[in-house]
Image: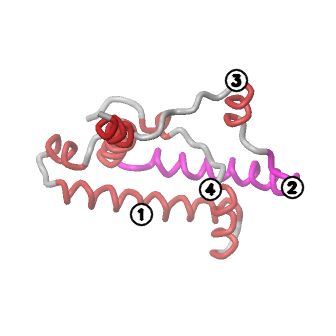
Amino acid sequence: VAAIRTARNLKRGPRPVALSPEELDRKSKPAPDPDPELSYLKAHYGREFRDAFEATLASLPERRRNILRLYYLEQLSSVAIAKLYQVTGAAVRLWLKQAREEILTETRRLLGQRLGLGAAELDSVIGLVQSRFELSMSRILKGPIA
């Protein structure tokens, strides 16, 4: 009996630990940046990055936006999306890869154009804002699926 209980407990995994309200509040707040200049740069470039990213998503063809919406927002698998479009799962995965590449390329182009930065500086800016960047794609991608 003890062995069976031990096996069941191990299979179930560790029990969640109850946190006090103070611990929950502390864990839900992001840690402040120790460097005020870094905070300013993240906020400034974050807005520019968000604007370029949103413009890129808005300029995508409707079909590509729909596929991204189904995959990222509705969390459908590539196989499920493939059934909707009557193609293979590999085709959907290729479409998603192409969409991600197009989004990255166009966002980098727009951001570089707006900020007047070279490739190395642009990589630094993207790395700077990427760690704290919170973008809701749902606002851009939501809408009826055609």
Mark 4 or 3 closer to N-term? 3
**Above or below — where is 117 with respect to 66?**
below
- The residue beneath circle 1 is 101
**Contact flag, marks 4 and 3 (Cβ < 8 Å):** no
Eyeballing the image, is 76 above or below 24? below
| Foreground: disc 4 or disc 2 | 2
Which region is colored magenta? 32-61
Which amino acid type is shown beneath numbered disc 4? Gln
Disc nearer the start of the sequence (2/3): 3
* Label 3 vs 1, first from the N-terminus: 3
Residue visible at 29% across and 37% down? 4
Question: Mark 4 or mark 3: which is in front?
Answer: 3
Q: Which residue is mark 2?
A: 35
Any magenta on residue 43? Answer: yes
Q: Residue 100 in the image: state x and y as whole percent.
A: 41, 58
Nearest to viewer (mark 2 / mark 1): 2
Element type at mark 2: loop
**Tag 4 residue:** 130
